[in-house]
Image (cartoon, rainbow, N blue to C red):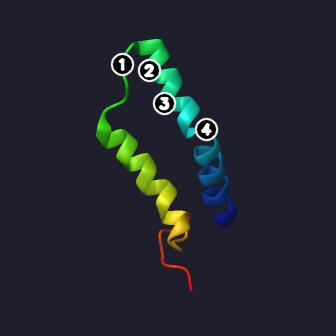
């Protein structure tokens, strides 16, 4: 389902800040830096022209 990658990306982009804040509020500590970096990398892929469903470069 190609649209699923797009939907996942939209949900992540709209909620990532809330997710980070909620984790910190509930645990008293933030997520490890590598987790935040992976989220950022995932969100940047869409902006750089990669398909979020398969990871291939868009033409």
| x and y, in percent, of residue 28 in the image | 39, 13
Q: Secondary structure at mark 4?
A: helix
Q: Residue furthest bottom?
A: 59
Q: Secondary structure at mark 3?
A: helix
Residue found 53% across the figure and 22% down from its top: 22
Q: Secondary structure at mark 1?
A: loop
* Residue 22 vs residue 9, the one in the foreground: 22
Q: Mark 2 sits on what residue?
A: 24
User: Label 2, label 3: how many angstroms apart (C-alpha)?
Assistant: 6 Å
* Residue 8 vs residue 47, the one in the foreground: 47
Q: Mark 3 sits on what residue?
A: 20
User: Label 4, label 3: how many angstroms apart (C-alpha)?
Assistant: 9 Å
Residue found 54% across the figure and 35% down from its top: 17
Q: Mark 4 sits on what residue?
A: 15
Marker disc for residue 47: none
Label pair 4/3, CB-CB below 8 angstroms: no
User: Label 1, label 3: how many angstroms apart (C-alpha)?
Assistant: 10 Å
Q: Mark 1 sits on what residue?
A: 29
């Amino acid at each position: 389902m190609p649209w699923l990658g797009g939907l996942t990306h939209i949900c992540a982009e709209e909620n990532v800040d809330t997710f980070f804040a909620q984790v910190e509020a509930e645990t008293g500590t933030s997520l490890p830096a590598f987790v935040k970096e992976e989220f950022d990398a995932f969100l940047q892929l869409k902006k750089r022209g990669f398909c979020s469903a398969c990871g291939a470069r868009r033409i």
